[in-house]
Image (cartoon, rainbow, N blue to C red):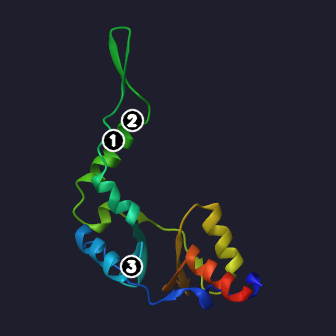
Amino acid sequence: MMTEKTVREIMTAEPVTVTPEMTVTDAARLMVEHAIGALPVMEGDVIIGIVTEGDLIMQDVKLEFPTYLHLLDGYILYPGAKARFESELKKAVAANVRDVMTPDPLTVQADATVEDAATLLVDRDVSRLPVLDGGRLVGVVSKSDIVRSLVAEAE
C-alpha cells in the first residue's frame, strides 16, 4: 500500500546540486549529463531554491512587451504587465542560477509518507520535491519515483 512507504524509501538520494553563482549554461549541462529535470540550489548546506528545465527554457522565450491601453488621449499600462515584463526580462538576460531559480522551494520530509508526497506534488502542480531530513537535503522525490513505486508494489 502506498501509505506504508516513506519518501526516504523511494527518493533519489544524494541529488546533484548547484550553487546560485553557477552559470545557467553549466546548470543545463548538468541536467543533460545526469538526465534530470531539476537541480536543488544550495548555499552551503541550506537549500535556497530549485532550478528546473522550465526555468532554463524561459531564457529562450520571446519577451512579451507590456500592454498599454489608449484611453482619453492617454496611455495606461495594463495592470500586472510591467511586473511580468520585468520578471521575464530578468530571466532572459540571466547569467547565473540565482537569476532563474525558484526561491524557497516546496520541500517534503524524508519520513513523510509517499501518499503525502504524492498529494503535495499534485496539489501544488510540481514534478519533484527536494527531500529534507533535519533541515538537510538528503534527496529528491519525483512523480516518476512514485509511479515506479506503485508499479513495483503491483507486481
Which quarter of the figure is the N terminus placed in? bottom right
- The one of 146 and 5 positioned closer to us in this rendering: 146
Tell me which residue sits at (65%, 84%) in the image.
Answer: 149
First in sequence: mark 1 or mark 3? 3
> Residue at image x 29%, y 73%?
27
Q: Is residue 110 visible?
A: yes
Q: Are marks 1 and 2 in contact (CB under 8 Å)?
A: yes
Query: Where is residue 76 drawn, in percent x and y?
Result: 37, 22
Q: Quadrant of the C terminus?
A: bottom right
Badge 1: residue crowd in 10 Å (few <14, some 14–19, many ≥20): some
Q: Is residue 104 left or right of residue 143?
A: left
Callout 2: few (<14), some (14-19), or many (20+) C-alpha neighbours within 10 Å? Answer: some
Q: Secondary structure at mark 3?
A: loop
- Residue type, mark 1 in image: Phe
Farthest residue, direction top: 72
Give me the residue at 26% from left, 52% from top. Answer: 92
57 vs 42: above or below: above
Going by the numbered disc 3, the residue's amino acid type is Ala
Compared with residue 33, is residue 76 higher up or lower down, i.e. above or below? Answer: above
Q: Position of residue 125 (x, y in %)?
A: 58, 61
